[in-house]
Amino acid sequence: MSNREYPRVVIVSANPLRKDMASGISMRSLFAGWPKDRLAQVYLPVAMPYPPEMDICREYRMIRTCGLVRRFHAQHEQQRSTIEEKSACRKPAAANGSWIGRLAYELRGRRGINRWLRLMQEAWYSYSWIGKVLERELRSLKPDIVWATLGNWCLTKITCTACERLAVPLYLKTNDDFIASLYRDVPLSSTLRSLSDRWYRRAVNYADGLATISPVMSEEFGRRYGKDWSWFTTLTEADDYDPSPRPADGTIRLAYAGNLGLERWRALRELAQALRQFGEEQKLNVRLAIYSSPHQIDTHRQALDVPPVTDLKGWASPEDLPRIFHEADVLVHAESFDPVMANITRLSFSTKLSQYMMAGRCILMFGPQNIGSARMVQLANAGITIGSNDPQSLQAALRPIIVDSSLRERYGKNGRLWAMKWFEAISGRERFRQTIVDALRRSDVRSNASALNDRQTTEAISCPATPQAGM
């Protein structure tokens, strides 16, 4: 295994490689199997300084808001990380030590104050010594290439600047259209969007590798920023999922697993109410199990309590999800119909959808039909997308997959085939590895061309042209 086959990669992101965070799960799926001595991560937590997990990567640097760096290494942290992993099921920020984490937790319901705090934090990260600290850590880690999940202004700025100053190649990964959505409700919104767009374009121009989370987003970003964009989402182990139909028990079982934010809880409530009415009219037992963080379940418990349809389950570990999905007939993804929220999720692709498809279950996508997640379900023909929350239209759209088990199976098979092509872990990681190798190769070509140009310029200056005779 040569260094060119597996370059030394340093990941830069806001979150560590953890199994209880969507971005952490996605990064883990991509880098699982990467040689541990060829991988490190530097992360800059926004508020919650979660410790990393050591099974994928052995070396971590966590840069705190004050600029102090905490280093984690497998030899010293294995026992500690095991203990923390067992108790890490979405601890609130207040349980994790930092004063910013405690403050954010205490003020979590005060949106106005939180908006100003976010603005202050962005400015601090962008203009304080945090960027120099990141540069110092990257220099000491000696990466062949930096792989960074970027989107917000401050992290994009300090990462791009550090890579430029160190002349380190950059592979830029983006999971959402943060420029359009992240600064919509903060003070100085237009200024922040302008800064974010400027630095993102600079990072795109510098980067030798570019990727988004879906083909829908890559197509849009190609038009917006130019260059060729790959796409990678959460990869899944095919053998972990049993796509065979579950034994019938007289109940149609639906399941939702994921975040309730961005008003997804509202869409789930509307869906649950429609399922209850449909079940009553058709004399069918229909149940919807909802899995999310304990905090979000508690926050929205009253709204989501639609007896006898909903069953609020709380948080499920990644290891439990294949069993949960196998025990369902239909897997649900929901997005808000609110125009502001729909604009935020326009290019998003839920990381759970790759797991839904690999499970071989029919997908019910409830939300605007033009957003990224809905378009991916349509591309794979893996289920139905219901783009109206009108009660009568909703019930009519639900009927086929509730009453027709053969239709559910066909959709499930389509999703499984799509997942095996695009989300299967072994082949997906090889495609991912090759894109990093290709990016490093492009960087070498660019560096050689730049060196040649500099040499020719130097020679031209030191050896001026000989004047022609007679002049």
Image (cartoon, rainbow, N blue to C red):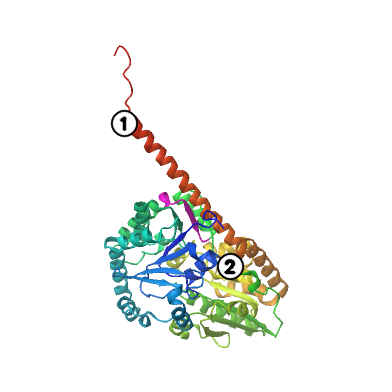
Please report contact status of discs 2 and 1: CB closer than 8 Å, yes or no.
no
Residue 355 placement (x, y as % from top left): 59, 70
Image quadrant containing the N terminus: bottom right
Q: Measured from the top left, where is residue 132 in percent x and y?
A: 30, 60
Q: Is residue 231 magenta?
A: no
Q: Secondary structure at mark 1?
A: helix
Asked if residue 207 lies in the magenta stretch, the reply is yes
Task: Answer with mark 2 or mark 1, whichever residue precedes in sequence.
Answer: 2
> In the visual, does 287 lie left or right of 179?
right
Q: Nearer the viewer, residue 79 or 355?
A: 79
The residue at which mark 2 appears reads as 354
Return the residue nearer the eye: 16 or 78: 78
Range drawn in magenta: 204-213
Outermost residue toward the top in this view: 470
Q: Tell me which residue sits at (59%, 83%) in the image.
A: 276
- Residue located at (51% from left, 79% from top): 269
The picture places residue 13, in percent across and down from the top left corner, at: 42, 65
Residue lying farthest to the bottom in this orientation: 308
Of helix, strand and loop, which one carries label 2?
A: helix
Which residue matches tag 1? 461
Q: Residue furthest left?
A: 128
Place of residue 25 in the rendered image (x, y in percent of width and height, measured from the top left):
51, 70
Q: Residues within 10 Å of mark 1 (few under 14, many from 20)?
A: few
Q: Residue 115, which numbered label?
A: none
